[in-house]
């Protein structure tokens, strides 16, 4: 046992041996303190650390002998908890600034000042304090519960069995998805197609790269752009200055875009995937930006910033079925549902095949995978190409649905897809779809309340918060959760980017 | 006979040359004059080694002698600056290994385990072995997604082979448990099963007995003999001399990146150079330093005469 | 006019921009050295430093719009550099505390760091856009900007000279710091082998945070210098960020002198290339350089290790 740290300031004016069982009672206190403390005495965000003080159940640990009563100030106001309160108050101020008025560069600090000197600050600070109280009480309650009943924590090996969500749940969700558009406004229906549906599809594709292969693609939307521009090129003589000598029904562009995007993925990935994984992130970032740049500037090819007008809608005239998709969003919505469900089933099978197992092997131990005969480079490239082709496929749908311009293919759109995958739960098909629904739902909800660009403040915050508190996502994949858990214990890895950075428990 | 053919039959250890195939003297691997340096440190200094098919060859030597480096050169993890490694997947098909990627070497029929076990921790025991049994399967994403017949058949074959390998190493009762949750000794055996899953003709075991108890060591000796009995040649790094002496048909001794002795276990045990390498100065212990002394040697008494 | 006529002018411009890339690249390289991690949010540290310096210097300018001269100019540049550095340092410190440290504590997988950094970057960019507006902000001239001397027919302006001189001074200072001080020794020790450094009594936590702050100070000051010639805006960080990263990789990421060399080289390549092809494809050139290095020599010109080099 290391040297006990000096007593917390809040407790220092309490006589050390006042409580029942005096000296013994302080031991568990110190045990809890030590993880947060090891990093150094002035740690403002220590309390946002899940392994540290935000999990203070041990403050009167189950096996720590007689403990002080839970309401004792020395227990309630440990240094870590006061720090937690401080952090929460800071977050409250930040939240006030984020939601406050918009400023400009002439008076750079005016907006922030206006946000803080405002009645709303009381609300935010009040919320911060309330949250703190809930956290503290929750921790105490949990501690008390664990004292009566021994904590039931299933050993990691035992929980292995059924995969995926039960069929009934899936069917219920599908039914909700089918009924949902009938009860909302047309604007919401549009959003369900353009934002939720398309992004769910994109997220399913990116999930193959991030969730299955453990790589990071920051230019993912570039393949989406390739699909959209391919549609304009092949299916319309007028949408862009540059067009094919013939015209195709957008349905026939699906396979073309699929192949084109996959090809672009292979060309981009083949040289880069040999290297350390984080280089892939930055190269794809650059690629995404270049595609965006070209789309925006090449006026006489892509029509530049004005975008492509008049790509025909999808239509079927086959086997006596003659149907045209039009401006009504609903038919597109149901088409998207069919496609999304199909892709989910397909990727589920892929995940459970030798290919999915190879990806898991690469994530968990790349050297061992290589030694077991897994062609790691080829499998990564395959994931990259599959992801890209889904993105290209979605691009066709997007282009045939409506007018588009390069703004739809910005860097931020790529980041947004990453956010959807992370938020929903990488590696989890249901998770990423739920992620798209929740995040785009949030965006739809914010659409009248904040300027569109400001929404990315919230998305950025969501990404960081998820990484800190719930890296496995909202609806985690069981395997990914186990991998993250084991990797954090130092067993194996959970991505294909090499060893974890310096630091950790020392 | 093609390798794929051997696999399709569903035999767990894919290549089982019959006794008449493994004529004595037929080589399975030959390393010539390997040199490996890291900056100024020489890890291998002109190491040559030959192994006959079906033989259990043990590589022993003090810590830092270059044993694992040798393995890494054979399996493609390191590329030696000099020398060559010839491997015969079949008798008349010599293949150069230096310069190939590890997974390609595995597919040729050289499988390995690691000194510090490297399983896929969040996969089940079965899945760990399946990854091995599936390395030569051909079906691609389309087959997997559409559930085409050949993909399903390959999948079933992979599972069947993996199950019988788990049975071979005595882990049938752990089929669906996570690799990370298995006890240490079982993890070692699971790693062997995974390596066997790739259908090797040469199996490299890097200290398979490290950290196991005496009973497990006895089981392991039996397992290694059984594996060799199926026609797989075994190249073994091991510190436990009792295990080496009981299973190895011949022994190579490395010290400071050089081969200092090779021969049968008995010959090597009596070799003065070996005794010196393990115990420092040979004169002190006299010429009668037999097996018991060597057993105490590795790790404990290494290089005390240096520096 | 031919390329050769313009050669020296292009060289001077390239060196000026390149020295800025080098200053930013150091942040990538230092953090990479100790954490083996690409700090994706470094470009936002640069952006925030740039705004800090710009606002501070602009706040002290006379209201009548006249251009100060002499000591007043020197003072303004110093204030801007200082404010930029402080804002950059603070931003880097906060970034490390919020986006990285909680992950480091539980030894999260590498992917988590990249994603967390992207989230932080997205947050910072758009918050800056909200607070400072989304237009370009320009810094008025801080001194009478004339030609100091001509060099083979190429004019060297006061501004270029100031930028280049300050940037080079920072580079040399950092090089001395890393190579010659106890702190630098600690940084190199952590870069070489963090586990052993811990055993040797190096406070790795402290080294990591100091490394972030040093990178932030440099990027912030560099941001102010950047704002002197170009404009500042909420989204200004991305392009120089990618270029500085390219410079770091070009020199050998993790290698301090490599980052300097890489920055200057990239500045030159871009300057010549922008003239020979088309100015709007300047950004593409940097990217192509990046891909080319990664394919041909991923360890960069001077190799990888912060510990060994410097």
Image (cartoon, coloured by chain):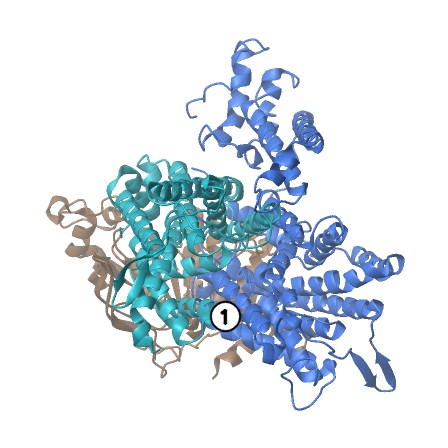
Chain colours: A blue, B brown, C cyan
Q: How many marks?
A: 1
- Of all residues, the one furthest to the bottom in this rendering is A245
* Front one among A303 and A398: A303
Quadrant of the image for the C terminus of chain B? top left
Q: Is residue B233 visible?
A: no
Frontmost residue, B167 versus A271:
A271
- Residue occupied by mark 1: A269
Residue C149 % position (x, y) = 27, 59
Looking at the image, residue A473 lies above or below residue A301: above
Q: Is C182 situated left or right of C24 in this image?
A: left
Crowding around mark 1 (Cα neighbors within 10 Å: few <14, some 14 to 19, many 20+) is many
Q: Is residue B1 visible?
A: yes
> Residue sitting at 62 percent across and 44 percent down?
A103
Residue A307's x, y, as percent? 66, 73
Question: Callout 1: residue from which chain?
Answer: A
Report x, y in % for residue C286. 42, 66
Q: Is residue B146 above or below residue C68?
A: below
In the visual, does C162 lie left or right of A157? left
Tell me: residue A381, above or below residue B172: below
Q: Secondary structure at mark 1?
A: helix
- Residue A236 versus residue A196 in the image, above or below: below
Q: Position of residue C54 (x, y in %)?
A: 47, 46
**Based on the displayed image, in which of its 4 quarters is residue C198 positioned?**
top left
């Amino acid at each position: 046992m290391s040297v006990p740290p000096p007593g917390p300031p809040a407790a220092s004016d309490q006589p050390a041996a006042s409580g029942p069982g005096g000296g013994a009672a302080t031991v568990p206190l110190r045990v809890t303190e030590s993880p947060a403390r090891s990093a150094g005495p002035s740690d403002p965000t220590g309390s946002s650390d899940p392994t540290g003080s935000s999990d203070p159940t041990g403050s009167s640990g189950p096996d720590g002998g007689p403990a002080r009563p839970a309401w004792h100030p020395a227990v309630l106001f440990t240094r870590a908890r006061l720090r937690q309160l401080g952090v929460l108050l800071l977050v409250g101020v930040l939240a006030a600034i984020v939601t406050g008025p918009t400023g400009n560069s002439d008076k750079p600090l005016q907006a922030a000042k206006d946000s803080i000197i405002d009645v709303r600050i009381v609300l935010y600070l009040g919320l911060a304090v309330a949250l703190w109280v809930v956290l503290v009480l929750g921790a105490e309650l949990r501690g008390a519960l664990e004292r009566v009943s021994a904590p039931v924590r299933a050993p990691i090996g035992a929980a292995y069995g059924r995969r995926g969500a039960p069929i009934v749940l899936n069917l219920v969700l599908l039914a909700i998805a089918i009924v949902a558009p009938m009860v909302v406004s047309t604007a919401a229906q549009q959003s369900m197609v353009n934002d939720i549906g398309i992004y769910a599809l994109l997220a399913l594709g990116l999930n193959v790269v991030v969730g299955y292969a453990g790589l990071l693609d920051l230019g993912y939307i570039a393949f989406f752009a390739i699909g959209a521009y391919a549609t304009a090129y092949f299916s319309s003589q007028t949408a862009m200055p540059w067009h094919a000598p013939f015209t195709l029904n957008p349905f026939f562009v699906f396979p073309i875009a699929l192949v084109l995007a996959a090809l672009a993925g292979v060309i981009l990935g083949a040289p880069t995937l040999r290297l350390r994984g984080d280089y892939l992130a930055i190269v794809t970032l650059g690629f995404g930006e270049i595609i965006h740049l070209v789309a925006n500037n090449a006026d006489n090819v892509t029509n530049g910033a004005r975008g492509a007008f008049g790509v025909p809608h999808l239509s079927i005239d086959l086997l006596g079925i003659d149907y045209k998709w039009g401006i009504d969003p609903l038919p597109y919505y149901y088409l998207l549902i069919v496609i999304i469900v199909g892709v989910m089933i397909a990727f589920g099978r892929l995940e459970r095949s030798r290919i999915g197992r190879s990806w898991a092997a690469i994530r968990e131990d790349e050297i061992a995978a290589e030694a077991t005969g897994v062609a790691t480079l080829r499998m990564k490239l395959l994931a990259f190409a599959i992801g890209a082709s889904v993105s290209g496929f979605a691009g066709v749908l997007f282009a045939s649905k409506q007018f588009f311009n390069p703004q739809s293919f910005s860097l931020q759109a790529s980041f947004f897809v990453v956010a959807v995958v992370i938020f929903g739960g990488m590696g989890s098909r249901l998770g990423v779809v739920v992620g798209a629904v929740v995040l785009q739902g949030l965006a739809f909800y914010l659409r009248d309340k904040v300027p569109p660009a400001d929404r990315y403040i919230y998305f950025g915050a969501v990404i960081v918060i998820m990484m800190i508190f719930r890296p496995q996502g909202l609806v985690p994949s069981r395997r990914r959760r186990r991998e993250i858990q084991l990797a954090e214990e130092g067993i194996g890895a959970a991505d294909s980017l090499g060893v974890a950075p310096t630091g950790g428990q020392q | 006979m093609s390798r794929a053919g051997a696999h399709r039959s569903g035999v767990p250890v894919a290549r089982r040359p019959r006794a008449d195939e493994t004529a004595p003297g037929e080589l399975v691997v030959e390393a010539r004059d390997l040199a490996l340096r890291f900056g100024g440190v020489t890890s291998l200094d002109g190491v040559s080694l030959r192994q006959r098919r079906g033989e259990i060859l043990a590589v022993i030597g003090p810590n830092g002698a270059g044993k694992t480096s040798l393995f890494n050169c054979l399996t493609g993890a390191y590329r030696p600056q000099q020398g060559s490694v010839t491997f015969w997947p079949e008798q008349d098909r010599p293949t150069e290994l230096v310069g190939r990627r590890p997974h390609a070497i595995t597919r040729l029929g050289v499988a390995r385990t690691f000194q510090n076990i490297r399983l896929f921790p969040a996969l089940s025991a079965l899945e760990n072995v399946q990854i091995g049994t599936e390395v030569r399967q051909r079906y691609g994403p389309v087959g997997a997604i559409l559930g085409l017949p050949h993909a399903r058949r390959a999948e079933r074959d992979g599972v069947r082979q993996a199950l019988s390998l788990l049975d071979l190493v005595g882990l049938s009762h752990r089929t669906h448990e996570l690799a990370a949750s298995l006890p240490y000794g079982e993890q070692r055996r699971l790693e062997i099963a995974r390596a066997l899953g790739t259908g090797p003709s040469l199996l490299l075991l890097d200290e398979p007995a490290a950290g196991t108890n005496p009973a497990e060591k006895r089981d392991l000796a039996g397992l290694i003999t059984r594996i060799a009995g199926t026609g797989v040649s075994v190249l073994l790094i091991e510190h436990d001399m009792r295990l080496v002496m009981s299973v190895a048909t011949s022994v190579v001794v490395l010290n400071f990146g050089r081969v200092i002795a090779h021969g049968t276990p008995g010959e090597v045990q009596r070799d003065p150079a070996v005794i010196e390498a393990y115990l420092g100065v040979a004169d002190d212990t006299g010429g009668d330093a037999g097996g018991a002394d060597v057993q105490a040697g590795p790790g404990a008494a290494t290089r005390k005469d240096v520096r | 006019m031919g390329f050769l006529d313009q050669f020296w002018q292009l060289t001077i411009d390239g060196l000026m921009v390149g020295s800025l890339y080098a200053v930013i690249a150091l942040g990538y390289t230092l953090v990479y050295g100790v954490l083996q991690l690409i700090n994706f949010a470094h470009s936002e540290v640069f952006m925030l430093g740039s705004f800090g310096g710009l606002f501070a210097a602009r706040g002290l300018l006379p209201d009548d719009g006249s251009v100060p001269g002499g000591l007043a100019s020197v003072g303004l540049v110093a204030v801007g550099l200082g404010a930029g550095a402080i804002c950059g340092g603070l931003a880097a410190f906060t970034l490390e505390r919020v986006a990285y440290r909680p992950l480091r504590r539980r030894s999260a997988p590498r992917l988590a760091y990249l994603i967390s950094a992207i989230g932080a970057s997205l947050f910072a960019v758009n918050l800056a856009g909200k607070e400072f507006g989304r237009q370009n902000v320009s810094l008025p001239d801080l001194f009478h900007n004339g030609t100091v001397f001509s060099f083979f027919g190429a004019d060297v302006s006061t501004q270029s000279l100031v930028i280049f001189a300050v940037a080079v001074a920072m580079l040399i200072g950092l090089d001395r710091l890393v190579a010659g001080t106890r702190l630098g020794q600690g940084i190199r020790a952590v870069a070489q082998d963090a586990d052993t450094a811990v055993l040797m009594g190096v406070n790795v936590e402290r080294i990591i945070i100091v490394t972030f702050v040093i990178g932030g100070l440099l990027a912030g000051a560099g941001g102010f210098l950047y704002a002197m010639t170009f404009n500042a805006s909420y989204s200004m960080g991305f392009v120089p960020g990618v270029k500085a990263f390219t410079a770091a990789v070009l020199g050998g990421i993790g290698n301090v002198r490599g980052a300097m060399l890489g920055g200057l080289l990239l500045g030159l390549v871009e300057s010549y290339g922008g003239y020979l092809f088309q100015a709007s494809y300047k950004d593409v050139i940097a990217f192509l350089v990046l891909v080319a290095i990664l394919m041909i020599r991923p360890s960069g010109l001077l190799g990888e290790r912060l510990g060994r080099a410097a």
